[in-house]
Amino acid sequence: MQIIYAIIALGLIGLVFGILLSLAAKVFAVKVDPRVDKVKDILPGANCGACGYAGCSQFAEAVVKGEVNPSGCIPGGTETAKALAAELGIDFAETESLVATVFCIGDKEKAPDRFIYEGVKNCAVAGRFYGGFKACTYGCLGLGDCAWACPFEAIEIGPHGLPVVDQEACTGCGLCVNACPRDLIKTLPRRSNQGHLVLCSSHDRGKSVSKVCSVGCIACRACVKICPQEAIEMDDNLAVIDLDKCDDCGKCVPVCPPVTIYPRAAIPKKLADLDQPTAAAVSEEDG
Amino acid sequence: MERLLSIIFIYILVENFVLQRFFGICPFLGVSRKMETAVGMSMAVIFVMSMATLVTWLLYTFVLIPLNLEYLQIVTFILVIASLVQLVETTLRKISPTLYQGLGIFLPLITTNCAIMAVTLLAVREEFAFIEAVVFGIAASIGFSLALVIMAGIRERLELADVPDVLQGPAVTLITAGILSLAFQGFRGMLTL
């Protein structure tokens, strides 16, 4: 008899909750884009959060809305991205892959500190303390706000005190761009790593730059004058190369007195590459 | 009234469910990395824990005891908690999509939060009256939130601290949790029911 009561009681409780839930589902029904469910089925369903969303459902919604690229799913990889693109009718090949690039090469030797800072290890904090411990007020403080912001562990502060972007791990999400208090990081289209860059962000005049950093852009305009493509323009005492116009001829590299211009291929692709000093590699190339 | 006040005080501070009873350690360590998620999780737990205690107490007293089915309490309570979480999810999705998005995966994960199961079971074992059980549920969930929010605050500061290499990551987190628990030991014996 007891067992029958148990079955009936538990069954009834279950039934009541079941009815309640189905009623709630009816009353509180939300119209969802049917594509979201399909996208959700394609995704791995691990809810890992590597895409920057709370889980796969949130990512699916964002993909359908077009807020994020199908390639945003890291564990899914290219396969998932292709399947998603096919499902949604987006041209997957057209999506431009971005990579974060640090626009400062003034390491501890080239751009010395002006006082010893022993405060909180955070660039935003250190930068507000007497304008930062680095003599160059535009330069990288190297305390790793960008590395901390990166959800893919693609940025690490190298032994020279500057961040190095692991270009394979970097997804171009741009969190480091927002994290850097000195706006030293930009996301650039990968495009097989072509083009040259002026790796400096200082808008100071030439004299002030050369006082605090041996590799900063001194706004001499030598590169602007020599560039056959007219791809280089001066922006408030800083030479900026337009990657759309640059054809990688490399004529600007030897004329740059402080050696601030590098081909993108020479930028270290991960921390391990640092064994070969980049400056030496470049001067060898140019004879 | 005095008894209700002491229930509130005891289960927020003296018998804190995370730091003294060691329930719900998983979400305590899992979602305490950022203050934002910690607060979201706390809100969801406060709601589910209070509601679950209320419903399970009623079910236990008016269904299970008259039928001599006390031994079914765990199964029944799991049913109640799972349904409640599902109900909250459905409702929240319609009423407040922003909060729903914010809580994300943490909402369904509450189902497996052992602190909630513990609160519902303890509410009947301690033989609380109805009002006492409800207050107990609310106090326990506030205690849980308090621990979670304190931990999130400490961990956000810890990210900026110069932690020795050997202690980086989980090690320093567990040590922090231990010290926090020791600190809460200070409330021990202050008040009993």
Image: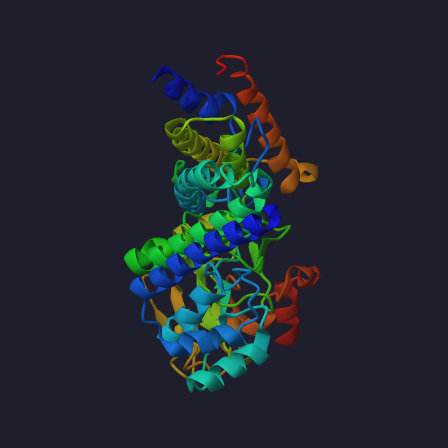
Tell me residue B111's x, y (percent).
51, 50
Q: Nearer the viewer, residue B133 or A94?
A: B133
Which x, y percent locates residue B22? Answer: 59, 32
Residue B143 vs residue A70, the one in the foreground:
B143
- Count all numbered tags in the image, as a single digit: 0
Examine the rendering and report whether any part of residue A179 can be seen.
no
Q: Residue at x 40, y 26 (%)?
A: B132
B26 lies above or below A43? above
Q: Quadrant of residue A154?
A: bottom right
Residue beneath the point at 37% across and 56% down: B100
In the rendered image, residue A216, in percent from the top left (x then y), is placed at 47, 57
Of the pair B74 and A99, the residue shown nearer to us: B74
Q: Is residue A184 above or below residue B68?
A: below
Q: Position of residue A194 (x, y in %)?
A: 52, 79
- In the rendered image of this protein, does residue B169 appear above or below residue A172? above
A235 left or right of A171 in image: left
Foreground residue, B24 or A42?
B24
The colouring scheme, among rainbow, by chain, secondary structure or one colour, is: rainbow
Q: Quadrant of the C terminus of chain A?
A: bottom right
The answer to whether any part of residue A18 appears in the image is yes
- Residue reaching furthest top? B190
Residue drawn at (60%, 63%), measured in percent from left and top?
A: A166
